[in-house]
């Protein structure tokens, strides 16, 4: 069974940057799409960014397009989320996820993801 563990969250001022990491263990996800989601208090978990197995296909939510980037290192079995120009509305718990289906290019649907990390808190102060 695979596990995912996020790191890199914290408190940052508006306009600042953070880089989240998601390290996989227990199995390789080098052939699987991975994604980032977030959940703010009182809101549903939402898609933020997704990356295909070979990094050729990327998807971003409109709310983060142009500010966030996603990348992966299949040798390290790790995916990253670089967040720039952070806003208070970006405050949420950020989750990393992976799909079990290999070579999927469907990156935005939460139900396509089978493995989830425990999340890391990102708080953006105004």
Image (cartoon, rainbow, N blue to C red):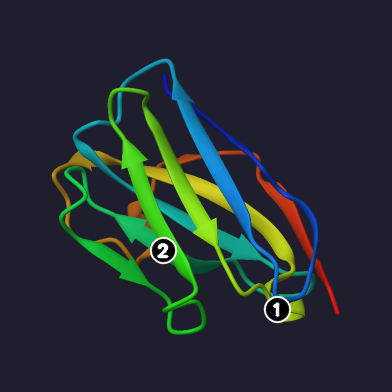
Q: Who's the residue at 30% across and 31% down the image? A: 29
Q: Name the residue furthest bottom.
A: 62
Q: Who's the residue at 66% across and 42% down the image? A: 8
Provide residue 125's location: percent of width, then percent of height: 86, 72
- Where, by quadrant of the figure, is residue 111 drawn? bottom left
Provide residue 105's location: percent of width, then percent of height: 17, 58
Q: Who's the residue at 49% across and 74% down the image? A: 67
Quarter of the figure with the C terminus:
bottom right
Q: In this view, does 89 lie above or below 84?
A: below
Judged left or right of residue 41, residue 50 is left
Q: Who's the residue at 43% across and 84% down the image? A: 62
**Mark 2, other Cα within 10 Å: few <14 / some 14–19 / many ≥20:** many
Question: Disc 2 on helix, strand or loop?
Answer: strand
Residue under numbered circle 1 = 87
- Confirm or deny contact between disc 2 and disc 1 (CB under 8 A): no
State which tag comes first along the sequence, 2 or 1.
2
Front position in the image: 79 or 40: 79
Judged left or right of residue 52, residue 10 is right
Q: Name the residue furthest right.
A: 126
Q: In this view, does 110 lie above or below 80?
A: below
Front position in the image: 66 or 108: 66
Q: Distance between the residues labelled 2 and 1?
A: 17 Å
Residue under numbered circle 2 = 49
- Where, by quadrant of the figure, is residue 24 drawn? top left
Quarter of the figure with the N terminus:
top left
**Mark 1, other Cα within 10 Å: few <14 / some 14–19 / many ≥20:** some
């Amino acid at each position: 069974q695979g596990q995912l563990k996020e790191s890199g969250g914290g408190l940052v001022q508006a306009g600042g940057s953070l880089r989240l990491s998601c390290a996989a263990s227990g199995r390789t996800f080098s052939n699987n799409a991975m994604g980032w989601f977030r959940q703010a208090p009182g809101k549903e978990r939402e898609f933020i960014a997704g990356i295909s197995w070979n990094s050729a296909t990327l998807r971003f939510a409109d709310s983060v397009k142009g500010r966030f980037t996603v990348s992966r290192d299949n040798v390290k079995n790790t995916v990253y989320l670089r967040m720039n120009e952070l806003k208070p509305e970006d405050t949420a718990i950020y989750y990393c996820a992976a799909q079990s289906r290999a070579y999927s290019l469907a990156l935005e649907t939460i139900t396509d993801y089978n493995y989830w990390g425990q999340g890391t808190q990102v708080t953006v102060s105004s």
